[in-house]
Image (cartoon, grey):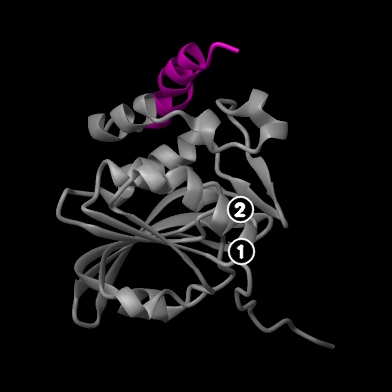
Amino acid sequence: MDFETARFNMVEQQVRPWEVLDQAVLDRLAATPRERFVPEDYLRLAYADTRIPLGEGDVMMPPREEGRLLQALALTPRDHLLEVGTGSGYLAALAAGLARRVTTVEISPERKARAERILAEYDNVEVIEGDAVRGWEASAPYDAIAVTGSLPVLDEAFLRQLKPGGRLFVVVGEEPAMEARLVTRTGAGDWATESLFETVLPPLAGAVRPNQFEL
């Protein structure tokens, strides 16, 4: 398979038409070999516009959604990013070329070990095994947070771990109605929320579900 051509087509035919126009983000997508991060059984889908299974119910987001996520966070060389859910490690690799530092937390020991091996060449990425369903207080506060699993209800712990001006990307809701949001901390106790797009994403492990109505 010609991965270089597939990567070019991914950027030009999937990501850019989905309103991802930030050149720094497009350059990272064009330069980062996604095939290195995809499970071997799904290698032929490395650049397809689809969710790729990672096991245990988790998935890689489609490339166009990853592009929108990075564009929304508007990472700079001064920023410290927290990624909740390392998954394949691909998003951390993309962010490594945009941010000063990336802290990525993965609850699965197997996925953490695999991602750590692949990400070893990125000296500004730290891969941690742990449960970050309520963020990761140890390295807070952050300039940006990316949550790669959905949350039925947004936990305010994530909001409190943002610096002033910090940005949070999160998918909130339950199937079939989920919404990708950008939340920006505008003051000590103030946040602004922007709706980005509708999507469906498996829930983050351990995410709290809203109380169900019972007869």
Q: Whole-percent x and y of residue 160?
A: 32, 80
- The residues colored magenta run 1-19
Q: How many marks?
A: 2
Amino acid residing under circle 1: Pro
Residue 97 in picture, x, y percent from top left: 27, 41
Q: Callout 2: helix, strand or loop?
A: loop
Q: Per the image, is 215 magenta?
A: no
Q: Is residue 35 above or below residue 157?
A: above
Q: Residue at x 66, y 23 (%)?
A: 44
Pick whichever of labels 1 and 2 is earlier in the sequence: 1
Q: Main secondary structure of the magenta part?
A: helix
Q: Is residue 6 found left or right of 138 in the rendered image?
A: right
Work out which residue is located at the far left of the displayed protein and give it. 78
Residue 7 on the magenta segment: yes
Q: Is residue 205 above or below residue 5?
A: below
Q: Nearer the viewer, mark 1 or mark 2?
A: 1
Residue under the point 28% across and 52% down: 124
Residue 207 in which image quadrant: bottom right
Q: Which residue is mark 2?
A: 201
Q: Specify few, some or many for label 1: CA neighbours under 10 Å numbering under 14, 14-19, or 20 or more.
A: few
The part of the image, by quadrant, that contains residue 38 is top right
**Quadrant location, the N terminus:** top right
Where 73 sits versus 133, above or below? above
